[in-house]
Image (spheres, coloured by chain):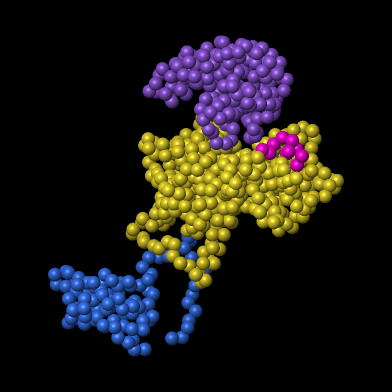
Chain colours: A purple, B blue, C yellow
Amino acid sequence: MSAGMIEIRWHGRGGQGAKTAALLFAEAVMATGMYIQAFPEYGPERMGAPVKSFNRVSEDPIVIHSGIKNPNYVVILDSSLMKSVPITDGIGKTGKVIANTSLSASEIAKELDIDINQIYVVNASRIALKTIGKDIPNTPMLGALVKVIGTLDIDDVLKNIKAKLTAKFRHEPGIVEGNLASIKMAFDEVRN
Amino acid sequence: MKKEESKKLTVAELPVGGVVEAGTAVNFHTGSWRSRRPVWSKDKCISCLVCWVSCPDGSIRLVPDEKRINIVDGIDYDHCKGCGICEKECPTAIGAITMEEEKK
Amino acid sequence: MIKSMYSKGSLVAKTGNEIMAEALRQIEPDVVAAYPITPATEIVQIFSQFVADGVVKSEYVAVESEHSAMSATIAASAAGARAATSTSSQGLCLMWEMLYIASGLRLPIVMAEVNRAISAPININADHSDTMGARDTGWIQIYSEDSQEAYDNMIQATKIAEKAKLPTLVAMDGFITSHCMEVVEAYSDTDVKAFVGEYKPERYLLDVKNPYTLGSIDLQDYYFEHRYQLAQAMRDAKSIILDVAEEFKRTFWREYGFYEKYMLDDAEVAIVVIGSTAGNVKVVVKELREKGVKAGLLKIRVYRPFPKEQIAKDLAHVKAVAVIDRSDSCSGAFPPLYCDVVTSLYSAGILNPKILSYIYGIGGREFCGEQIIKVYETLGKVAFGLEKPSGEVEYINVRIK
């Protein structure tokens, strides 16, 4: 990994949108002028099974095409995965975990046995239910991730996602508004 | 006939991709393969064209009559291989085609 | 900050499959016949949507197998259409006998191929076994490191195929490239259409005024000449490929050749590789250079025709070379790329470089970082006489004992 490159790993269950979140995030970040990569865990996807997806973000062109072993950020869409999947693999002492959970950061730190400063929490499922009407935590988690990374402009990100979702859901404007609201809300609510 | 080496095309002369010009079968006189020859009787023939339809080599010759309807005009011996299908297919009651030994 | 090279291009975030479908949309072949297969499915899925939406005028033939896909593509091409298809792995295997017919009839079909391992055991991830198996079918083979190259190669392939009268396959690595979203500079429809131009076949079967026979029997008296023509066409395609690359550079400002040299000119140790792994190697080469190691890389783009003279010349000065293959020929000797590189050097009378053979990444196994450094370490020892090459093919990251 070259200096200045950000690597992200998303954990979710098949159907929760871990891959979509990584793709959406990449496109939005590209709009801010960065080079990006987004790719799923290479393999068949099955509903409910643990899945991973990845992002790279860099100021320079990205030539590396390998899996991500030492992510700077780990995003957990489904907190039940913490018991069955090695969520903290490769994050070392500096990698940050952003979890969709109703628990506090200290409770998660105990669960994962890592420093509390590495943990960020947000109740993305509650936000999704409130804003989108369904438990689809991937878009709110995207907002939380943008906040935790800190160097990305949330307004640029929202603008790009709005354009992208508007094109995709042109017959269901409610979906677009709900998703945008969820991103904004998670951006505001994510806590250390 | 004395065997002659025919001039074969070189790589440079050959059309690419195995393209073969159309209509070249006319130049290939398969009539020499024949051991028995069909003999057609103009008097018996009613021009039902069953032989023409059946001939695998298109060797039944047709000509238009005064009403511009195609009628049988004989056999193309340059290309007829002597298979005898025309004799077999010609209606029994008519019997306008008979196979005879090829005189060589 | 991202920069675009071609001032009229636009930067888009696309996966390899998405951008390949985009290239097909812009090329707009008259006929596309394909059967979906992981990881290439999206290419024809997206393209068939373009057809359904009336975005392109192409005829899409949904066939029942890859054998039929290739057969329909051959028929369309012979009839006079610009024809394309896409496949991967077992799909390419099922096309096998038809691949030879496409090249034997000299039909400029273009194929978007996504490299995937071959069964058994069943595996959907990247290696080059599928296209390497088809290396002697008379198809031009162009490999891509990333989505940008896949896109650029596809645009060039259309032109190369039609000029060389040879079917041409553009490959990218399954999932690693096909499913990875990256920044790609896409060109305008007008510019791509202008570049590929209109397809005007010299002869075609639907030209009823000039009828001819195609696919007739060809025995001892002519078959050899026709096969020589094919082999010669592959040799002649080299200059066509370079001409098209030159024109592409003039138009879109991106430079392509038979292969990419990365810090190779003064290298003492070098790796020869195909596909997406080149990027991982570049990262290592850069690190090693910073430490003063004269490491280099040669990334093959055009594998068929094989640029033997140029490769021999460009590797002649390297002390030790590792040719790393992402497929195993199971030949009992050495894998395909190694054989091509070694024969190229030997036949040119260049015997100095020590050349090592490695196989990596079969069935999608990772090859990066430390493992690449280890190959360069071995090369360093061999280059300076501290270690003797084993004389055998070495397997990277496989549990043998």
| Lateral position of residue C378 relative to residue C185, left or right | right
Q: Position of residue C343 (x, y in %)?
A: 70, 56
For this orientation, the residue located farthest to the right is C386
Tell me the quarter of the picture where residue A177 sits. Answer: top left
Q: Position of residue C174 (x, y in %)?
A: 57, 40
Q: Main secondary structure of the magenta part?
A: helix
Residue C373 among magenta residues: yes
Tell me what residue is drawn at x 44 percent, y 51 percent. Answer: C68
Tell me the quarter of the picture where residue C277 sits. Answer: top right
| Lateral position of residue A186 relative to residue B67, left or right | right
Tell me what residue is drawn at x 79 percent, y 51 percent. Answer: C390
**Is residue C268 among what the camera can see?**
no
Q: Nearer the viewer, residue C98 or A190?
A: A190
Q: Nearer the viewer, residue B60 or C210?
A: B60
Tell me what residue is drawn at x 40 percent, y 19 percent. Answer: A173
Residue A31 vertical position relative to residue C400 in the rendered view, above or below: above
Residue A102 among magenta residues: no
Q: Nearer the viewer, residue C344 or C187?
A: C344
Tell me what residue is drawn at x 29 percent, y 81 percent. Answer: B38
Q: Position of residue C315 (x, y in %)?
A: 72, 48
For this orientation, the residue located farthest to the bottom is B103
For this orientation, the residue located farthest to the left is B67
- Give the mark count: 0
Q: Which quarter of the figure is the N terminus of chain C placed in?
A: top right
Residue A117 vertical position relative to residue C223 in the rendered view, above or below: above
Q: Which residues are magenta?
A: C366-375
Q: Position of residue B48 (x, y in %)?
A: 19, 72
**Is residue B46 among what the camera can see?**
yes
Q: Which quarter of the figure is the C terminus of chain C placed in?
A: top right
